[in-house]
Amino acid sequence: MPDAFFQKKRKRTNTSSSSSTGSGGGASSRAGPSRTTKKSTITSNSQSRMRNGRNASPASSDNDDDAVPGGGIDEMDLSHNYNQGPNSDDEAEAAETPAEARVRLAKMYLQGLSSSNSAPVDQAQDGDDFFESDQRPSFGLADAAVADRDNIAARLQKDVAEQSGRIHLFLSDRIAPPLSTSTSSEQENAQHAQGRVDYTSSMLALRGGHRQSVTCAVASQDAKWLFTASKDGSIIRWRLRDGKLIRILPRRSKHLAEDGSALPPTSSGKSKTSGAARRRARLSKPSSTSSSSSSSSTYLAVGAEEGHTDEVYTLSLSSDGAHLASGGADKRICIWSVSNPSSETFLKTLSGHKDSISSVCFRLGSQELYTASLDRTLKLFDVSQLSYIETLFGHQESVLSLSCLSSETAVSAGGRDRTCRYWKIRDESQLVFRAGIKSKLREVLEGGDLSSSKPSTGEKGAMSNPAETQEGSVEVVSMIDSHHFLSGGDSGSISLWNLGKKKPIFSIPVAHGFDVINSETEGEIRTPRWITSLAALPFGDVFVSGSWDGRIRVWGLTSSAGQVKGFKALFDLPVEGVVNSLQLIQPPLNTVVVSRDTGMVSSTAININLYKRRNGLSSHIHQQDQKDQENLSKLDKLNTSKSNSPPIIIAALAQEHKFGRWIHLKHAKNGSLIIPLLLINPSTLATTSNHFNLV
């Protein structure tokens, strides 16, 4: 019986076979090795079937012929199916659905959180890790602290809080003032009862270098450097650990050489031992001389078209510490490169404002610079490109203060127009919050009466007339988070604002008391001291305020039903002079230590024993003490977080206000104060239920 494989109804001619062969060869040559491999595979399969067909029995051949649909190999689909499954990771990602992609990314994120603790310590970013520690984690040990440290839920909650721009640093219940100078516990308790405790033993002062009032003081985020500005037009760099003067960025000299370098003024007929003579000597020595010379290394030569020519009002330091921006009465915004402490350089002058620069502020984690001016405008610059971006209009009077955080938003104080404006840069929009005058009838209708307000601490008598607290100017603003900010005005009131309401959610009138003047014709005249400076801990529940009443007051936010409702006074610190600027910073986590004696958390970023002035600006010079305290220990891994980093207050004090000479305090000294605060050890603090629960 003939083989069924060779029984074909269709006959192939030589022409068709040759044409098919030619076309197949051409296609093979064009297609490359993949089609050749496919053709050879099909040929080998057909040859094996032919051999099997010859050796098979006739019965089996008939059965196979009947089993094949269509009656032969011509009807079989021998092509490769490319849709059976992906052969690579790229094809797998392309084939997955959006829901599967979200699940895969979530698993990768959780794996990254679980494996982050096993990374080397030197690869961790300074201050960014929530459980940052100098000790390597131990594996294979049943330690409860390690298990709690790996709590992924806490990590996720912190990430959500930071990215949402809400308050996530709760320190008001644990913050404490610096150590008191009281020699006995009875004396300290008596001072606490009177509300006046002397904390000046831990108030580190920086004096010298500036000849006029200090207008601003800013510190770097890593608590290594401090920059101060003055009305004499100079900027000074200090080392924050020991208070040593590192560099002077002087005012532009009026006497220049042919090459544009600064020349010292003539010294004929002048003293050779005075402070001015020493400054002339520093200026006369070129900066290219021996680097070991202290005089040449502390003075930066400023050439033509560089530096300031008038009073400097404001400073701002970028988050990475690479750029310093300064502005003042000369309408110039000077950009300095300060990344290298041994070679500061002047980069460029950013112009555009038509009046004095009142405030400059870098956006956190960015090189974007916001500037405010007395010409009623705000401007936005990109310092990385040293270029201008845009101008913001809206204020009807001079802009006196500016504040911003990490998001593309800013808050400004409009001065005499009595408004605070919240700027949304990306949306090109603004929200207007009106402070200003409130009528007595409106206060009664809203459930309050200014005439029945309680006086501030230490003041005698109550306000007799609501007009005494009418706000005529908004002086300063400070952002707490992306939804709350603070404002202070010439009425002495501090107001807390929420973006969801057009009026303050909480206010304290006459926060720094009254300034009493005795008049022969009108008797005693009492005017409220206006708020000259405000500073809030970014994304924290602590802020400070200053005026010229001799106190820096520390406040803490309060909450109700999971929402910020107000604030309360925590304690105050004695100072002398007008507080022209305030700043709150947190030192790096690797410097946080706890005292075995008192159980208080402090920082080693600042060594009190190395400062020459340790009891305020009016104190005498002390000898430096090199010995360190031996009763300090590192926090455990579980408690090493930014919530346990004690804040540091940076204050600029002067005899006069930075914008004018309306106030002159003869007994005050010009300089800066560094006040390291303390925190109660979280292991000894009882768990409280009044923490915020913001979502």
Image (tube, rainbow, N blue to C red):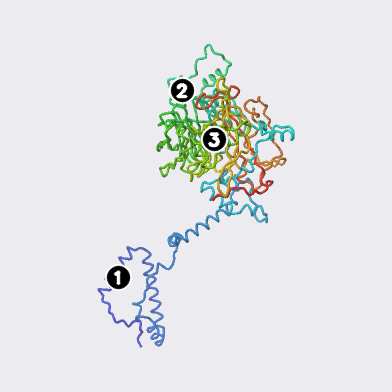
Residue 21: give its label: 1
Cβ atoms under marks 1 and 2 closer than 8 Å: no
Residue type beneath disc 1: Thr
Residue type beneath disc 2: Ser
Left or right relative to 273: residue 65: left
Residue identifier under label 3:
493
Where residue 146 sits: x, y (%)? 65, 53
Callout 1: SS:
helix
Residue identifier under label 2:
261
Where residue 147 sits: x, y (%)? 64, 54
Where residue 45 sits: x, y (%)? 40, 74
Of the numbered discs 1 and 3, the one sitting upstream in the chain is 1
Left or right relative to 488: residue 81: left
Cβ atoms under marks 3 and 2 closer than 8 Å: no
Quarter-wise, where is residue 305 in the image?
A: top left
Of the numbered discs 3 and 2, the one sitting upstream in the chain is 2
Left or right relative to 73: residue 435: right
Q: Residues under labels 1 and 2: Cα distance?
A: 88 Å
